Image (cartoon, coloured by chain):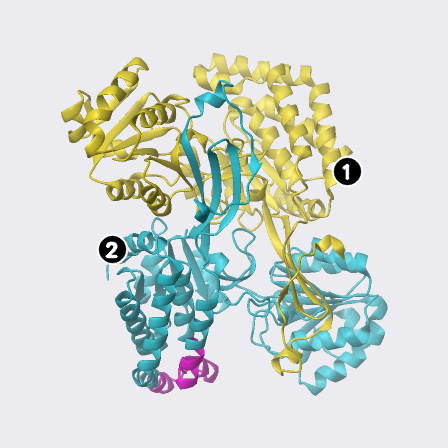
Chain colours: A cyan, B yellow
Amino acid sequence: MDIKQVCVKAGEASIRMAELDGAAKNTALSAIADALLENKNKLVAANNEDMKRSREEKLAEPLLKRLKFDEKKIEDVVEGIRSLMSLEEPVGRTLLSTMLDDGLELYKVTCPIGVIGIIFESRPDALVQISTLCLKSGNSVLLKGGREARETNRALTEIIEGASIAAGLPEGWITLLESRDDVNEMLKMDEYIDLVIPRGSNEFVRYIMENSKIPVMGHADGICHVYVDKDADLTMAEKITVDSKTQYVAVCNATETLLVHEAVAGKFLPALKEEFDRRQVEIHGDEGTRKIIAVKAAHETDWSTEYLDYTISIKLVRDADEAIEHINTYGSGHTDSIVTSNKLTAVRFMNLVDSGNVFWNASTRFSDGFKYGFGAEVGISTSKLHARGPVGLDGLLSYKYMLIGNGHIVDDYANNRKSFKHLGLKKQIGDL
Amino acid sequence: MDIKQVCVKAGEASIRMAELDGAAKNTALSAIADALLENKNKLVAANNEDMKRSREEKLAEPLLKRLKFDEKKIEDVVEGIRSLMSLEEPVGRTLLSTMLDDGLELYKVTCPIGVIGIIFESRPDALVQISTLCLKSGNSVLLKGGREARETNRALTEIIEGASIAAGLPEGWITLLESRDDVNEMLKMDEYIDLVIPRGSNEFVRYIMENSKIPVMGHADGICHVYVDKDADLTMAEKITVDSKTQYVAVCNATETLLVHEAVAGKFLPALKEEFDRRQVEIHGDEGTRKIIAVKAAHETDWSTEYLDYTISIKLVRDADEAIEHINTYGSGHTDSIVTSNKLTAVRFMNLVDSGNVFWNASTRFSDGFKYGFGAEVGISTSKLHARGPVGLDGLLSYKYMLIGNGHIVDDYANNRKSFKHLGLKKQIGDL
């Protein structure tokens, strides 16, 4: 596969994608949904092949579970496509309109980014989700899935590509890359690919970030914290801590470190330990913690470890400022929550913790595009540029400035024959 | 200078900067403006030293002109600071508010990015402009100016640093780097620096882009186009073409290539050539052009050359689509304008030309933050992520999600004891 050729075609297709209106894109999405349902048996058969081979190769049980793509999963992704269709057309929205002068109007209008590279591990549903998000936002997409899902990904791409092109989408808007060499080639194509979105393990995401000049949207680590302040309602604090740690341990917004104000630790920790013991959560505590409850010792490495498991580290702090500093030092800028009834402390925490999601009296597990009501999720970004936090369709968009005049030239303004008025308009570019 | 230490201090300061309110930042800006005026003589003396040394070193005349920092320039930058003070406080603005469920409210709130690195060539006014923009947006800043402006930059930084810290800003928020080694060290600090903004020549910007993993905001080339369509008013087309090329040739939004629909070229080009001859603009034409007017031959390299001079390349095209394709192939995604009275053609051009600024019947010279009414300009970006086109204060901001609950946990939603409501609010985070 000549990756540069693939990129050039994807770029050409992206120009055509940019001019599709909402109806054309929804027609293609609908055709994809129908085709996925019609080809259920083919998809399940392809997935069975992957499952069989992966079992023989002794793939770990959690990965086998993610690889599984059965009728239920097909129905889920189809439902996802239908809900994507119901979202407002993201391209061509006017974000700002200004009358610069009589007859000279400026519009800031959303547009697709261009060519997106997606690299994901085992889950085949990610392929459908991400490629349809790219379609809805008018972007071309290069996909690379895990080797273990080879047959499923191939069948899915064939169906999506076939149905969408038959429905009028340009050839080349979607391409599946199959070899690891292809990925390494793709990571070099910074001239052609505008954005890479890696979905997978920390090591995997970090590898992508370190081996490409293409901007990366996503997150490597999710080292999230709960801080229990001296003014916390301790019953609430326990509820939030337990939910943040145990509601689903294998995800990025699960809490890994608990910070407790030393003034309440004596009362808070023993009850919390009972609850964690019941749920078989292993605790690694700092010295102060171990004076109150009998737990393993936490080491410096604990503060920057994403356990993704029934393990939590606990540290006592003198005050909210020490908690904030700990989080800004060891955290990953993902999600951090304070439990307190003191508004001033809460606002200070939310302003000074340098993370995409800063919570007050709520579980860290809430940071998620669907829970936020975005309707679709591209991923969660810990970058501070472009998109931060849970990213919806917006993260797949750029904007351009459209200026509409009537023969206007700058010389008239440079020589004071005319002057700018800069009046805000409430016009949409569609009103032209 | 230990750059890593400087970066760590800047990072710590950036957390303190994030909690400053608008009044505190304006007080610091006002103190800086006063201090610059009070130290006029010192600044002019420092600049005289730079001018003298640079003349001895035979610095080119245009660069000497940029280096000059006299009383008039000091008054200009002070006026810039006063106008920056009058802009709305950029940090803490609520971009979105949603009630996820009773008592669980989500706010998307603007915040500073963190630590910004600025690298600029000769003009000392850029130092003042950019550092005060960083202050207003609550960011720490590392500055590196040109060697030729060493004394001026040193004096300016001392004044800005002294006045702002006396006014309450945290130490370490601003640092001037002086050696080229420092810059190369700085470009490696992707762990500490969130964004680099290079202001200078193409080669310079390209060097930065290719030698750092830190995201770069800016543009290397400005290869801008005017396309004269078959449905153009040719008088208007000539006016726009002449302004786009000659109003100020040394800037990025000056036009470098003119595309002309072959149906109107015979009528349009002879008159245009007369006007260009009068203004001593050298024309490099393709074969079609040279059948109509006697000009030098354009070569393939002309289409991707930023002359920044009284030179223009001209190419005939069959239709608007060929113009769009030419622009998307050879342009730099900066600013491109169509002259036509056909609305459909204009809209197609603006949708399909993949540039930050796409104009209809207006000179390319309009793409500029001040002309757009942004009140301040960080630079012009040709990236499609984060900020595109002329960038105002917004480009120095990120956002974070603040979620405010009352003991809310995800388990209640996972087990259907509660369900999300997702109602849009019109609340500001300040209303808490």
**Helix, strand or loop under label 2:** helix
Q: Indicate left or right for B102 with A377 as reference.
A: right
* Residue occupying the point 29% across, 30% down: B258
Magenta segment: A51-77
Q: Which mark is residue B168?
A: 1
Mark 2 Cα shell of 10 Å, populated few (<14), some (14-19), many (≥20): few
Callout 1, which amino acid?
Gly
Q: Indicate left or right for A225 with A179 as reference.
A: right
Residue A199 image offset from top left, x and y in percent:
46, 67
**What number of labels is visible?**
2
| Chain bearing mark 2 | A
Q: Is residue B54 magenta?
A: no
Callout 2, which amino acid?
Gln
The residue that mark 2 highlights is A5
Q: Indicate left or right for A318 with B316 as reference.
A: right
B329 and B423: which is toward the camera:
B423
Residue B6 image offset from top left, x and y in percent:
63, 42
Q: Is residue A55 magenta?
A: yes
Q: Is residue B221 visible?
A: no
Residue A280 image offset from top left, x and y in percent:
66, 85
**Residue B410 in which image quadrant:** bottom right
| Chain bearing mark 1 | B
* Relative height, residue B62 to residue B432 (above, below): above
Q: Main secondary structure of the magenta part?
A: helix
A304 and A164: which is toward the camera:
A164
**Residue B295 in which image quadrant:** top left
B168 and B426: which is toward the camera:
B426
Q: Is residue A160 visible?
A: yes
